[in-house]
Amino acid sequence: MLTLLSVFNLLILCGTESSAISTIIINATVGDQVLFPVPVHCGSQYGVTFLLTSPVNAKLASWGFGTPHKHALYEKRLQIHQNASLALQKVQIYDTGLYEIHIDCYDTAVMETTKTKFDLQVFEPVSKPLITINCSTKNASLSCCVSKGTNVTLYWEIQPMSGPSDRIDDKAELVISPGHEQDKYTCVVQNPISNATSDLQTLEKCNDQSSTGFVLYISISTATVLLFGLVIIIFIYIAKLTTDDKGNNTAIEKWNEETCHLSDGAIEATYITRIRSS
């Protein structure tokens, strides 16, 4: 893809005959071909120098007067066109920087070097954003994230139950205000060369979780009551068994006491069994 100049800013310095410094801002996508214009206004004798000035200083190419030259790292990516332009092929993020083109005229009259400055910004396009729902906080919240893109900014749009959509926030996390749980939301991400919008998102998931939580609460409460009732029944049953055993033991002990006391052979034995309940 051929990248055109997005912004052109020209500053003319007064007080000199032909001294003009212009700055051209170029926004490019990774993989694009970028054209740097070379405005030659000389005769047949001139020289052009292409420089990288930031983040490092380097002479990338020169042609015209003298022997043509290309930097070894740019040998296959720099192309000099006859239509007064210089092409940088397949730009990458690391190509972001400040560049200059210097033009020197070598006619009979010596002219001052003409300089053009370029601010090249290379961006990776943004991917489609994904929204994550958080239902655990007091107020539900939405989080927006992207897997690809450089220099990404974002904002949220709300689509009410009635009325047009509206831009509401520019933070990665959006806390839903009370009363807006039924509205729909989208996250919009962008950078200077691309933009993308998420799918519409609602808070039905949080509402479903609330209903499920209520049902779970009722189920646990019912099970607890039933278990507690069962424990009480078992306790009463065990207590009753213990009481019956004590009554039987009392009767047996009393019967043994009477018969043993009346076991003298000279007296007719009378057996008395007394049952005493406690």
Image (tube, rainbow, N blue to C red):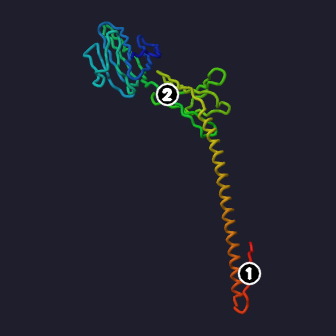
Left or right of 54 in this view: 224: right
Left or right of 24 in this view: 256: right
Query: Residue at left 67%, top 71%?
Result: 245
Viewer-proximal residue, 54 or 29? Answer: 29
Do the CB atoms of the residues marked 1 and 2 lie less than 8 Å apart?
no
Residue 263: give x, y in percent of width and height: 69, 88
- 207 lies above or below 118: below
Give the image quarter of residue 80.
top left
- Indicate the amino acid at tag 1: Ile
Residue 38: give x, y in percent of width and height: 36, 13
Q: Quadrant of the C terminus?
A: bottom right
Q: Residues within 10 Å of mark 2 (few under 14, many from 20)?
A: some
Query: Residue at left 26%, top 16%?
Result: 68
Q: Residues within 10 Å of mark 1 (few under 14, many from 20)?
A: few
Residue 232: give x, y in percent of width and height: 68, 59
Viewer-proximal residue, 168 or 115? Answer: 168
Viewer-proximal residue, 127 or 80? Answer: 127
At numbered mark 2, what does the secondary structure look like: helix, strand or loop?
loop
> Disc 1 versus disc 2: distance between alpha carbons?
103 Å
Give the image quarter of residue 39.
top left
**What residue is pinned by disc 1?**
272
Count of marks overlaid on the render: 2
Q: Nearer the viewer, mark 1 or mark 2?
A: 1
- Indicate the amino acid at tag 2: Val
At numbered mark 1, what does the secondary structure look like: helix, strand or loop?
loop
- 250 lies above or below 72: below
**What residue is pinned by disc 2?**
152
Residue 27: give x, y in percent of width and height: 44, 20
User: Farthest residue in the bottom direction?
Assistant: 266
Q: Quadrant of the N terminus?
A: top left
Q: Earlier in the sequence, mark 1 or mark 2?
A: 2
Viewer-proximal residue, 244 or 128? Answer: 244
